[in-house]
Image (spheres, rainbow, N blue to C red):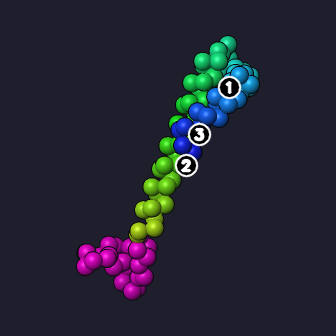
Amino acid sequence: MIPRRLTKAIVSQHSDKFLDETVKFWEPRVQRDLSREDARQITENLSGFFRLLLEWDAQQQVRHDIVPCAVSDGSGELPMPSGSSKLKALTSPR
């Protein structure tokens, strides 16, 4: 995950050039004139969006790491951990 302070450091380090390039990239797409403040907000929003995607991905990875792998006994049901009730397998015969 890219920390917020790092993305802010990148933007501030290359501030003028980076924001000018952002304006140059986005103006034709939004079909209006953009200021450096618009470019800064676009950068913050995109950074936040990708930061959120990275967080969700990390959470999903954790969930997959703790889900036990079950082996079917051929009955069409999968055993659940800790004595839980059995779960009907999606691939059970109809």
The first of marks 1 and 2 along the sequence is: 2
**Residue at disc 2, secondary structure:** loop
Which image quadrant is residue 70 in? bottom left
* Amino acid carrying mark 1 in the image: Ser
Task: Name the residue nearer the viewer: 82 or 39.
Answer: 39
Pinpoint residue 26: horizontal percent, then vertical percent: 68, 24
The first of marks 3 and 1 along the sequence is: 3
Q: Residues within 10 Å of mark 2 (few under 14, many from 20)?
A: few
* Amino acid carrying mark 2 in the image: Met
Residue drawn at 27 percent across, 77 percent down: 82
Horizontal side, residue 5 vs residue 32: left or right? left
Q: Is residue 88 magenta?
A: yes
Which image quadrant is residue 71 in? bottom left
Q: Are marks 1 and 2 in contact (CB under 8 Å)?
A: no
Vertical position of residue 71 compared to residue 60: above or below: below
Q: Which residue is mark 1?
A: 15
Residue extending furthest bottom?
73
Task: Name the residue nearer the viewer: 54 or 11.
Answer: 11
Q: Which residue is mark 2?
A: 1
Task: Name the residue nearer the viewer: 88 or 54.
Answer: 54
Residue drawn at 49 percent across, 55 percent down: 58
* Amino acid carrying mark 3 in the image: Leu
Horizontal side, residue 36 vs residue 93: left or right? right
Give the quadrant of the C terminus.
bottom left
Pinpoint residue 34: horizontal percent, then vertical percent: 65, 16
Highlighted range, magenta: 68-94
Residue drawn at 49 percent across, 43 percent down: 52
Which image quadrant is residue 7 in? top right
Q: Which residue is mark 3?
A: 6
The first of marks 3 and 2 along the sequence is: 2
Q: Are marks 3 and 2 in contact (CB under 8 Å)?
A: no
**Residue at disc 1, secondary structure:** helix
